[in-house]
Amino acid sequence: MPLELLLVLVVGGIAGITLMMHLAGKSRVRTLTPESARSEWLRHVPDDDIIDVTVAHDGHSALIRTPAGNGLVWSFGADTVARHLLDFDWMDHPDGLEVFFHEFGTPKVLVRLDEFERQHWQHLLEPA
Amino acid sequence: MTDQVTFPDAVQWAIPFFIAAILAEFIWIAVKGKGGRYETRDSVTSLIMGAGNIASDLMVGFLIWAGFMWLWQITPLNLGTSIPVIILCFVLDDLRYYWVHRFGHRIRWVWASHVNHHSSQHYNLTTALRQTWTYSFTFMMVVRSPLILLGFHPAMVLFCGGVNLVYQFWIHTEAIKKMPRWFEAVMNTPSHHRAHHGRNARYLDCNYAGTFIIWDKLFGTFVPEQEDDKVDYGLVHNIGTFNPLRVAFHEWVGIWRDATQPGLTVRQRLAYCFAPPGYSHDGSRDNSEQIKAKHIARHPEDRGSPGFEQFETDMPNSQAKRV
């Protein structure tokens, strides 16, 4: 196949499919409730027991307390990703907290919090 | 042997079909309200991975071609290019695919290349195009060498491999539940391949087939999709990025970090590179056998069922024991 035609097909195909999906509303981000955050955590980490769940007000992140320590589950497109908060750093961000995982495939996540939530989450992340 | 033989690049010529089929599946799901899910960024990542795969093939393909032509020159055998020989080549190349794919799940060095194909939590036709950029790093192309030395022309071998990949495109769908029974018995199908993409304990390390599912049945890796265990797509530890560069290289970076940490023996460093995914020197991670054993401990009723045949069926409901 001529390279020019290959390029047109690949670039045009990606652009067209992307536009179609976005216009069809497929870019919406998953919203979590306490129940769905709990079930999503157990989907990712089936061995865990959950003590309690704290969902951020925007519904895109939830802090999970387990006997093994805290964990974070967050919206990832239409799905979720979860990590135990074992090897991580966090920094204040104008919109909340930014959590950095030392992982190339899961570098960081922005947890959007209001001022009241920010203090509560900081307390939960660093109870000492 | 230096005769001129040419075959088309099946994957490149199938691109218009890929685009049309994705549109058709998307519309089908929208109209029917079932049969799969699409998400914009997930699909864009998959499509860019597919484009990158074609680009990487264009960049290193000539090196692989040169190696194959060298083998072709030293072999005294030439089976020609008749239709029966092409069919035989396709079947044997599919057997080659089965083993390379199995290595891709059982050897971390090869998994580092293949993992990106499993990194989506979705299962639709764009997932089929979420292909590796780093296959040449694995050196798995050498597994094709026996075919060339047996007298199959390199162009034919690559053509058959391309047709195999094109075949596998359509099975990445939830829109087709089951094919006719005879077809399910012999061919790889959407149902069989959905199980392969599952992160459920039951479905780990099963259904490596490309075109013919018979290889899994022959080598004991076949697990049928179960009505009562819906496939949960993705990785055991799902990644949190849509960035194609991170998708393509995250496991390679993981190998580097694991194998270069201080205080390990040479054996442990090699195990981080070549042992099955999930190996850790301190037992802090689980491989697929350990994940299955933990599942059986939580769900003893699954003991002996498909995907858990290696666990005894008559154990008291305490600790799972491997046969």
Image (spheres, grey):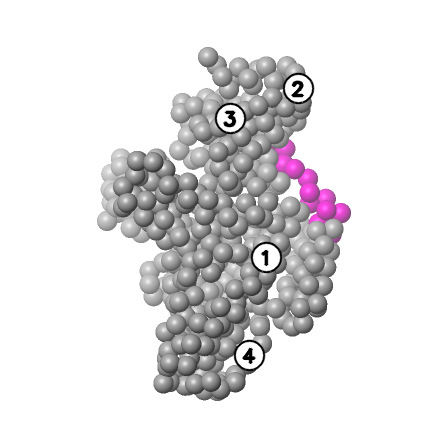
Taking the image as shown, residue A29 lies to the left or right of residue B67, namely right
User: In which quadrant of the rendered image does the N terminus of chain B lie?
Assistant: bottom left
Q: Provide the secondary structure element on which disc 2 rests.
A: loop
Which amino acid is tagged 2? Asp
Q: Using the numbered discs, state the Cα–Cα distance from disc 1 to disc 3 in whole angstroms.
A: 32 Å
Query: Which residues, given as a range, are shown in magenta?
Result: A20-34
Residue B52, disc: 1
Q: Using the numbered discs, state the Cα–Cα distance from disc 3 to disc 4 in whole angstroms.
A: 54 Å
Prevailing secondary structure class for the magenta stretch in the rendered image: loop
Asked where in the image residue B295 lies, by quadrant, the reply is top left
**Closer to the camera, A96 or A2?**
A2
Query: Which residue lies under the disc numbered 3?
Result: A89
Which amino acid is tagged 1? Gly
Residue A114, disc: 2
Asked where in the image residue B268 lies, by quadrant, the reply is top left
Q: Provide the secondary structure element on which disc 4 rests.
A: loop
Q: Is residue A124 magenta?
A: no
Badge 1 sits on which subunit?
B
Residue at point 36% right, 37% down?
Answer: B261
Q: Do the numbered discs 1 and 3 sit on residues whose CB atoms are within 8 Å?
A: no
Q: Do the numbered discs 2 and 3 sit on residues whose CB atoms are within 8 Å?
A: no
Which amino acid is tagged 4? Phe
Q: Using the numbered discs, state the Cα–Cα distance from disc 1 to disc 2 in whole angstroms.
A: 40 Å
